[in-house]
Image (cartoon, coloured by chain):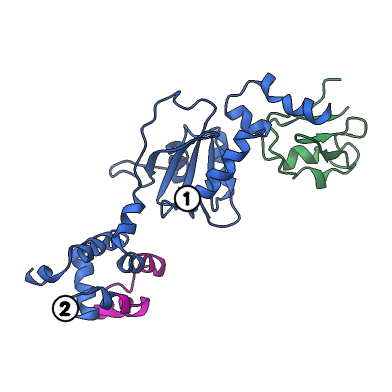
Chain colours: A blue, B green
Amino acid sequence: MSSQDTLSRELALRIGLAARALPDTDAKRLFNVLTHCVGLPITEDKLGSINLKTLKTAQEGEFSNIDDLQLKKALHILKTDAEMGEALAPEIDAYSEGDMPGSVRIAFASNDATNVDGHFGSCSQFMIYQVSADEARLIDIRDTGIPAGLEVDDKNLFRAELIQDCQVIYIASVGGPAAAKIVKLGIHPIKLTGSESIAGIIERLQTVIAGTPPPWLAKVMGIEANNRFRFERAATG
Amino acid sequence: MALYIVEADCISCGDCEPVCPTNSITEGAIVFKIDKKTCTECEGDFDVPQCVKVCPIDNCILPLEA
């Protein structure tokens, strides 16, 4: 363990976070592989020199069975400032029902907590925002991991039920049957054409809410039908 | 005999417009709308109304009460 004394707190944190991104890997296992890659002491510069191939072949291919994508993610964590890592877990704002009149609750399928970059069935978390015309609060982050001991027949239904209180969900992609389950729970799925930042989407949505929301959105926002059709009169009259 | 689009439910996806055999569907000021004078509910062209078939929202396109 004396070798770890030479590891800076920052790097130790990164290794811990990166290990979590890999299946069946604790910090110690990752640390051993990294030691094999670059030797001791592990420094920031040395970490920067590791690429996917070296990581995959190190220690007689200890990580050769792990998916490239997961390894890339771990590498990314190893090479980026852990300050960024803290941004990965943004603070949750307090919210109680009725705090924000005229608002909608939106779920964003995300892997990195800042972008809608997730597939409905595989994203690591749903970021839950309450959005009104002039305010947006992150009110919850829901982990999509199935709790140990819980038997789930239908993963997509489990995920849809996680966000049952939301009116809209933004996803980077979703399959047909999964979308049907989302719709059945009264949630409106919106699929983006590519990865987009959550902040950008919220900003756009706020312009829509502040202006004239389309009838289906007005309906889920709970705006009375009478107030909804002002636009029609304005547009046709 | 015609269909209409429930304004509160239509999400303006536009999927129904190209499948209408009588070109009765157009984009209105708020959402899409069906011209009741030309809508045939697809009779003579298809077994089921095509707009209802492609519409992603349940009960969004309904028969007009005559």
Estimate the x, y position of residue A187 in percent, counting from the top left.
55, 36
Residue name at image x 30 percent, y 58 percent? A83
Are the two marked residues, 2 and 1, in contact with CB atoms closer than 8 angstroms? no
Estimate the x, y position of residue A149 in percent, counting from the top left.
28, 42
Residue name at image x 55 percent, y 53 percent? A173
Q: What is the secondary structure assignment of the residue under circle 1?
A: loop
Magenta span: predominant SS is helix
Mark 1 nearby-residue class (10 Å; few <14, some 14–19, many ≥20): some
| Range of magenta residues | A48-73
In this rendering, is residue A15 above or below B33? below
Estimate the x, y position of residue A55 in percent, counting from the top left.
31, 76
Q: Is residue A148 left or right of residue B22?
A: left
Report how far apart the C-alphas of labels 2 and 1 lie in the structure. 40 Å
Return the residue at label 2: A40
Q: Quadrant of residue A139?
A: top left
Q: Is residue A182 left or right of residue A163?
A: right
Q: Residue furthest front?
A: A134
- Let me know if residue A53 is in the magenta part: yes
User: Which amino acid type corresponds to the residue marked 2 in the rendered image?
Assistant: Leu
Residue name at image x 31 percent, y 43 percent? A147
Foreground residue among A102 and A27: A102
Return the residue at label 1: A121
- Let me know if residue A185 is in the magenta part: no
Residue name at image x 53 percent, y 49 percent? A200
